[in-house]
Image (spheres, coloured by chain):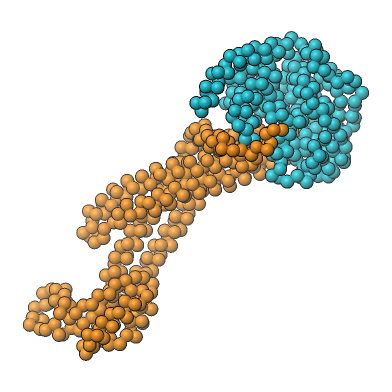
Amino acid sequence: MIEFKNVSKSYSNGTKALDGVNLKIEQGEFVFVVGDSGAGKSTLLKIMMREEVASEGTVIIKNRSLNAMKKRDIPYFRRHLGIVFQDFRLIPNMTVYDNVAFAMRVIGAKEKKISNRVPHVLARVGLADKAKCLPNELSGGEQQRVALARAIVNNADIIIADEPTGNVDTKRSFEIVEMLNQINASGTTVIMVTHSEELVRRFGRRIITIQDGKIVSDDVSNVSVEPVSETQVFGDLDITSKRAIREADEFIRSYNSTIEQDGGETDEQ
Amino acid sequence: MSNKTERGGSASLTYLTKEGFRNIRSNKLMSLASVAVLMSCLIMIGVAFLLFVNIDKMLGDISQENVIMVFIEDDATDDEIVEMGREISAMSNIQQVSFVPKEEAFPEVMESIGNAAALFEGMESELLPDAYEITLRDMAGYDASISELEKLDNVIQIRHNREFASQLTNIRSTAGYISIAVILMLLVVSLFIISNTVRVTMYNRRLEIKIMKSVGATKWFIRWPFIVEGVVLGIISGVVSLGIVFAIYYFAADAVADMSGVLAAKPVPFKDYVFVMLAAFVSTGVITGAFGSIVSMNKYLKEQEYDSENVSE
């Protein structure tokens, strides 16, 4: 699914961010990428997103060579990706609902489809009742969950998360990774850059360590043999995530009762 | 990936247009500022244009008075005279030809010399020859027309004021060049202003643009709202400044009319040019708006690419 063959990246200022990286990630995998600041993690992700192009070597994602990709094809390629940033990147003057809907609108989705899909996704990240809030009314963890909802709303095949827990306290960090776990359980590939050893230790996943632009270890030893089942995930949830499930239930109830109202609004438009 | 094939239907177009208006609303002060500056450019363009039109008309009027008289041999037959008139009319640069028979010419001359006419009392109109009075369409072709006229048969003399004509032509074309230069300069300024506004809007919304790019919005999808913004600002400026130019012209024309005794020239009526100017203003607004948006956006998108090179980990 994702393959790096001997990839190097040098910037015009002479910095060599990646140096002969070989990497293969299969569909449905969950991979942590760890390494010190400046090790080349972000460059790795940027090349995956086709924000940067490898100076040497080839990058193949979903059977397509990113090196040879035409500029006009880049947007369509990016629709396979769901990207989550450390700083959330939510639009401050848009509600939670609109922030998620925005990702659908800007690729030309129909409003009807959006109004069906967004509440579903918000319920999935446990924010059904926050749909009308503005980002600054939410906690850091909640904001990152909105970003997560935005990343999955277009049914991405690959979630790329660049330090998604960097601005969130430990407890909320677990919550977010737990959610990524759930997303991964439904077959989506997840690649997450992180600094947190605690997280990496707790979730038994493949760990790729980068140092000075090189992959120094690619550790699959602590990957759980059994794929994580949904019951396992739910059993492992802490109280906050249980609250998320409760929120989802509440949402479904309140959503059903407001369907009529929403339908009326749509007709008026 | 059910969405990736959707490239945006009419629903998207509505959305994109709405976004353009949202840009203007969320950016009120800047929008207002750019409308104001663009309007002042358009007003200056309008005033420069009307000034040119009036000067041109005035010079045109003056050159109309600069007639060429072709005096005809006394022994020319009526047929020859008629034939001559036909030949003159057939020439390329002739605005108007009129036959002035000696019977008419005499009292006119008498009148023009005023008191001195008393000296000629009792004299016959036979003194003067028949003539053709000719006005030219384009003063620039003055010399060519004169030499053409000189080739005619039965001509005694051609009376004309070549120097005056060439001066007029010079003034007219100089005025034309200056107007074009001024208008072009103002157009460039307008373009710069619009593109600047759009750049500020884009800077304010760089987060949204980043997100749009990361979720796979096409370049045109990102651009469209900004083009709408530019075009709408252009149209507003165009229409409002036309109104202001009208007001300015109305008062200025009044003032000029008061002096019309001195100038002996009436200002060109505004309504003659209102549609030309409306079309010009709105299209200037639209073109500068759209073009300004595209130019500034390409700049911005390029910056984005550079931006991503400043790797931060």
Q: Nearer the viewer, residue B120 or A122?
A: A122
Residue at the extreme top of the image, as rendered: A239
- Picture coordinates of residue B102, whole percent (x, y): 17, 81
Chain in cyan colour: A
Q: What is the total number of numbered labels drawn onto the structure image?
A: 0
Assign the N terminus of chain B to one quadrant of the image.
top right
Q: Is residue B205 visible?
A: yes
Q: Is residue A151 visible?
A: no
Query: Is residue A224 or residue B63 the one in the foreground?
Result: A224
Compared across the picture, whether B299 is left or right of B273 comes to right
Q: Report which quarter residue A194 is drawn in.
A: top right
Q: Nearer the viewer, residue A15 or B132?
A: B132
Q: Position of residue B18 (x, y in %)?
A: 52, 34
- Residue B265 in the image: x percent, y percent? 26, 60
Furthest residue to the bottom? Answer: B75
Q: Residue at x 35, y 56 (%)?
A: B51
Above or below, A114 against B87 in this view is: above
Quarter of the rendering occupied by the C terminus of chain B: top right
In terms of image quadrants, where is residue A201? top right
Q: Which chain is orange?
A: B
Q: Residue at x 88, y 22 (%)?
A: A223
Residue at image point 82% right, 27% down: A28
User: Where does the image place residue A87, in percent across and percent down from the top left?
Assistant: 69, 26
Along the line of sight, which residue is nearer the eye, A26 or A66?
A26
Left or right? Give the position of B258 relative to A42.
Answer: left
Which residue is at a point 50% across and 52% down the rendered structure image?
B188
Residue B208 vertical placement versus A196 (above, below): below
Location of residue A46 by image quarter: top right
Q: Is residue B205 above or below residue A121?
A: below
